[in-house]
Amino acid sequence: MPKATGPIHALGNRQFRTIWIAALLSNVGALIHIVAAAWWMTLVSASDTMVALVQSAITLPVMVMSLVAGALADSYDRRRIMMAAQLFMLVISSLLTALALTGHLTPWVLLAFTFLIGCGTALHNPAWQSSISRLVPRPDLPGAVAANSMGMNITRSVGPAIGGLIVATVGAVVAFAVNAASYLFLIYALIRWKMQPAERRLPPEGLGTAISTGLRYFVMSPNLMTCALRASLFGFGAISVQALAPLIASQSLGGDASTFGTLLAAFGIGAILGGLLSPVLRSRLRSEQVCRLTFTVTAASCMIIALSPNTVLTTVAFLLAGSCWLNTFSLINATVQMSSPQWVLGRMLSLFMTGAFGGMAAGGWVWGAVTETAGLSVALMGCAAFLVAGGLWGLWHPLPEMDDTNHDPVNRFSEPSLNLDLRKRSGPIAIQLEYRIAAEDTDEFLASMAVRRRLRVRDGARHWELLRNLEHPELWTESYHFSTWTEYVRHNGRKTRDDVENIEHLKALHRGDAPVFPRRMIKVPPSDGSRVLDGRFAGHGAAE
């Protein structure tokens, strides 16, 4: 596990600090919008479910669109994607302000425009999150992720308070206008940010291929699946504190918009304190222990809020919930970032966010519906019970530890010379490697091949098979396919240190006189055989 560095250290990086400040100012506007939208909904709708759906409308798009946004972030210039997202949200927020000003903002129209703002957020987030690792050194990445989460939660202490004040004094229309103006800060910072685009030797993957490749990599990475599931469980339970905050302020505490703003401000302050505490927790506790602790403390906060009619005690509970919120999501986010190579990082972060925001969107709807049918206290106690169960889940599926292994490609592959006129999109391509394995090494070979299969399929290989020769049982053939030659080259460019260690181990088990080299072939229908000879390529190139 790398030495824990804090968010203050990461903010010493000038480029990261510049974008961080601009994002903080933009996020203030976003929180002002949420306060104004939630309070507007309490005024124009008598439904508790509609109030809770404001949170779902802002988070649901992240669940629905996140993987597409992650694929775009991995395939194209991330700075341009962020620019497009910010400009889109500027236009949508301006239209929302105009509708509110002219009296045409109905509950469902408000939810629709809030959903569109969420779509812009969904497009922006994977591109920004996957850019952090290019702004700071690897040892500072957990601190930078925590600083990014702190920035979002600093806005929770400032944005809701400002939003509540604006709504209480001059109305929600002005609050919507302030949010529209806030996007200008980040747009300006992105214009000035001269990020060097990643070098690409191959054309970008098609959107459908990029999505399927990302899903395959995710499914073949158990640690990443554990991270996404745990984020979803926490998001489903913990979102209740924020989604039901307007009702807590008005029903439990008998307050107004300023009380609502105060509760969310306490949540944000708690997140800031949690960010400052995060390096201490990570240095003294294992990741799973930190995660279990935050689940438990958030459950206790929900119980306090459910039973307390006292504003001060409820505010303290919000502060504790905010601290746990940041520590949980920043820990899981950093774990995903440090466990994923750059070529698929945007997609892995998007799937993490799909889990997290999907849990939040579902939780906002479920706990709102429970509140409407059984009451606010029952809903919050149900959240507490769910979070306790989510913490216990880690006994069977613990959160993986962060490590300092570099998962980026080792770039050892050189494209071989071919004796056929092969185009980049030619295919399908078949690859075979033959191993001679002694009988006493069979079990070890099969165990290594199980790892090999996961790594091959994870990085894009299809139809992987392991074949044993019936006449010469010591001979084994590994076989797998690619749709095109470009996909084969792309696959080999993704090899990490883990892949290389597995390859070297298999080569060490090989007892043949000749080294293990791939046979690269193209599938040819019989009618085309005379045109491409037998489809076999000359030249061995790099070993697989």
Image (cartoon, rainbow, N blue to C red):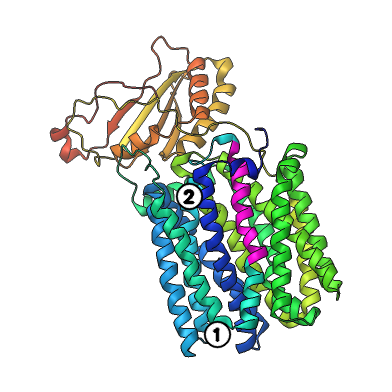
Q: Is residue 244 above or below residue 445?
A: below
Residues rendered magenta in the picture:
140-158
**Can residue 303 be seen from the camera position used here?**
yes
Task: Give the residue at x 68% y 65%.
Answer: 239
Query: Is label 2 in a helix, a strand or a loop?
Result: helix
Which amino acid, by three-letter code, is at mark 1? Pro
Quadrant of the image occupied by residue 398: top right
Task: Give the residue at x 74% y 37%.
Answer: 283
Tell me if mark 1 has few (under 14), some (14-19) or many (20+) residues whose alpha carbon lies within 10 angstroms of its own.
Answer: some
Tell me where residue 55 appears, x and y as whole percent.
61, 71
Task: Give the residue at x 67% y 70%.
Answer: 161
Is 29 in front, or is 246?
29
Residue placed under numbered mark 2 in the picture? 347
Tell me where residue 177 appears, x and y as whole percent.
50, 76
Residue farthest along the top direction in this orientation = 513
Residue placed under numbered mark 1 in the picture? 107
Q: Is residue 531 magenta?
A: no
- Position of 225 with respect to 211 (left or right) is right
Residue 344 is labelled as none
Q: Is residue 526 above or below residue 352?
A: above
Quadrant of the image occupied by residue 528: top left
